[in-house]
Amino acid sequence: MPKMKCRCGDVLSYGEIPCPIEHLFISDTDFDKFVGKIEAENLYSTMKSFLKCPNCNRLWIFWNGFEEEPTEYIQAQ
Ligand SMILES: [Zn+2]
């Protein structure tokens, strides 16, 4: 199962289906290319993922798929 270590020390594993810490998103531009009824598989393959650490709430956004390192985002206080 793929996993990564969060900066806070938690280990985030993201191989589960469905994965409770993984969120999917799509840009408005990409979504706009879909018309009418949408095949879930097609939509899924266009969406990108981020993981939300349940311990520190950091977001790790995989802008370019899971092959590349994610970008870290931390909540401002
Ligand atoms: Zn964390």
Image (tube, grey):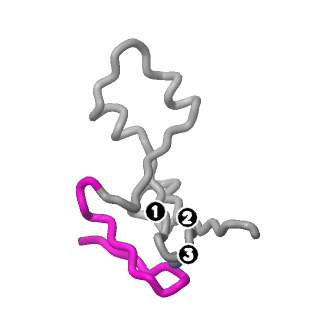
Point out which mark residue 56 bears. 3
| Percent coordinates x, y for residue 71 in the rendering | 57, 65
Tags 2 and 1 touching, CB below 8 Å: yes
SS label for mark 1: strand
For the residues marked 2 and 1, what is the alpha-carbon distance in whole angstroms?
6 Å
Image quadrant for the C terminus? bottom right
Q: Is label 3 within 8 A of ligand 1 (CB to nearest ligand atom)?
A: yes
29 is higher (above) or lower (below) than 54: above
For the residues marked 3 and 2, what is the alpha-carbon distance in whole angstroms?
9 Å
Q: Name the residue at the right extreme.
A: 77
Point out which mark residue 59 bears. 2
| Percent coordinates x, y for residue 62 in the rendering | 48, 58
Image quadrant for the N terminus? bottom left
Tell me the amino acid under the disc marked 1: Leu
Point out which mark residue 51 bears. 1
* Residue 73 relative to residue 37: left or right: right
Q: Which of pointers 1 and 3 lies earlier in the amino acid sequence? A: 1
